[in-house]
Image (cartoon, rainbow, N blue to C red):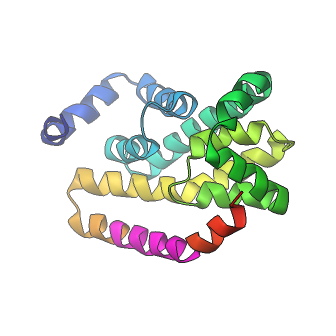
Amino acid sequence: MLVQLWENREALRTLVESKGPLGPVIFVLIQAGQVVLAPLPGEATGLAAGFIFGAWEGFVLAMMGLALGSSAAFGLARLFRDLVHRHLARKVFYQKVLLFNRKHGPTAAFLLFLFPGFPKDYLCYALGLLPLPFRVFFPIMLLGRAPATLALTLEGEALYREDWRMVIWVAVVAVVVLGLFRVFKKRFYQEISV
């Protein structure tokens, strides 16, 4: 399937463009659904945004979808607090979120959104259970998700254009950032260990 997608990348863009103004709306809803339901890895939709719409339009659309989906997850956690708590209470990461939040407050949420590999979609649900106001959650979520989303959309556009230098450049920057996070990973996990 990926090979077919690669060979027919113009067809994919044409399909989205054929939907007119609904194409971007459909993508935003898919991105939002990915956060709420988490059936797709967020990285796939971020790459797809850049691949289909280009880096900057893709970034804006992906962030709109992430904002919508993250807000929905946060709100659903507030609305169905007991159900969400029962589901998350079994997850180790939830206990770490609680502890890290207790020690560092909203700064913890921002760092967790930035931290590579941390389950950000579940994080939106977890933060909805904490006494964190939405007006604080929303900008933290946007700022924390933006760097990785921008990198993914840049990578997606570079893949579409077959700009291998840009693909390598973005990959190298990502590896350096991941390396920096690995350096601090041990300290971070000691900080949030339960």
Q: Is residue 179 magenta?
A: yes
Residue drawn at x 72%, y 54% as measured from the top left? 109
Left or right: where 7 falls relative to 160: left
Residue drawn at x 78%, y 36% as measured from the top left? 129
Residue drawn at x 44%, y 23% as measured from the top left? 22
Residue 42, horizontal then vertical, whole percent: 46, 42
Residue drawn at x 63%, y 65% as measured from the top left? 189
Q: What stretch of residues is rendered in magenta? A: 171-184
Q: Is residue 5 above or below residue 156?
A: above
Left or right: where 23 falls relative to 71: left
Residue 16 image-quadrant placement: top left
Question: Total marks drawn?
Answer: 0
Quick one: quadrant of the C terminus?
bottom right
Residue 107, horizontal then vertical, whole percent: 77, 61
Q: Is residue 169 above or below residue 12?
A: below
| Majority secondary structure of magenta residues | helix
Q: Is residue 122 magenta?
A: no
Quick one: quadrant of the N terminus?
top left
Residue 134 image-quadrant placement: top right
Residue 121, horizontal then vertical, whole percent: 58, 40
Instruction: Return the residue nearer the eye: 44 or 183.
Output: 183
